[in-house]
Amino acid sequence: MTDITYTIVEHDGGWAYKVGAVFSETFRTHEAALHAAQRAAGEQRVAGEDTGISYEDDRGRWRDELSAGDDRPTTQVVDSKK
């Protein structure tokens, strides 16, 4: 199972959450960024319906797969201020 970490960081004159190398929008306060990260992390854990997905692999071949709606990642929020 995949684990996703949302890290609260100072960013662009305010606060943001970061997943990997990607930043969220900038929030004016630390608390606003923390709440946004908690909300996003919670939404990642919500199961959905099974759905078909199609994608092109690195060799240029199209693949079809079934994505299980209950295959959700574990998430955590890390506050760099603490």
Image (cartoon, rainbow, N blue to C red):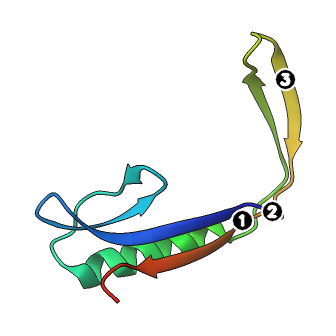
Q: Mark 3, mark 2: which one is toward the viewer?
A: 2
Give the number of the disc on residue 1: 2
Crowd around label 2: few <14 · some 14–19 · many ≥20 (10 Å): few
Q: Is residue 73 above or below residue 61?
A: below
At which x and y percent is residue 16?
29, 66
Q: Residue at x 48, y 76 (%)?
A: 39
Q: Secondary structure at mark 1?
A: loop
The reply, left or right, for residue 39 in relation to residue 47 is left
Kind of residue at badge 2: Met
User: Residue farthest to the top?
Assistant: 60
Give the number of the disc on residue 3: none
In three-dimensional space, the C-alpha distance between marks 1 and 2, rounded to whole angstroms, equals 6 Å
The reply, left or right, for residue 66 in relation to residue 14 is right
The reply, left or right, for residue 30 in relation to residue 72 is left
Q: Earlier in the sequence, mark 3 or mark 1?
A: 3
Give the number of the disc on residue 63: 3
Task: Please count the marks in the image.
Answer: 3
Kind of residue at badge 1: Pro
Q: Earlier in the sequence, mark 3 or mark 2?
A: 2
The reply, left or right, for residue 29 in relation to residue 17 is left
At which x and y percent is residue 44?
62, 66
Q: Secondary structure at mark 3?
A: strand
Kindly identify which residue carries mark 1: 73
At which x and y percent is residue 76?
57, 77
Q: Is residue 43 above or below residue 12?
A: below
Disc 1 and disc 2 in contact, CB within 8 angstroms: yes
User: Residue farthest to the left?
Assistant: 13
In three-dimensional space, the C-alpha distance between marks 3 and 2, rounded to whole angstroms, equals 21 Å
Q: Is residue 49 above or below residue 33?
A: above
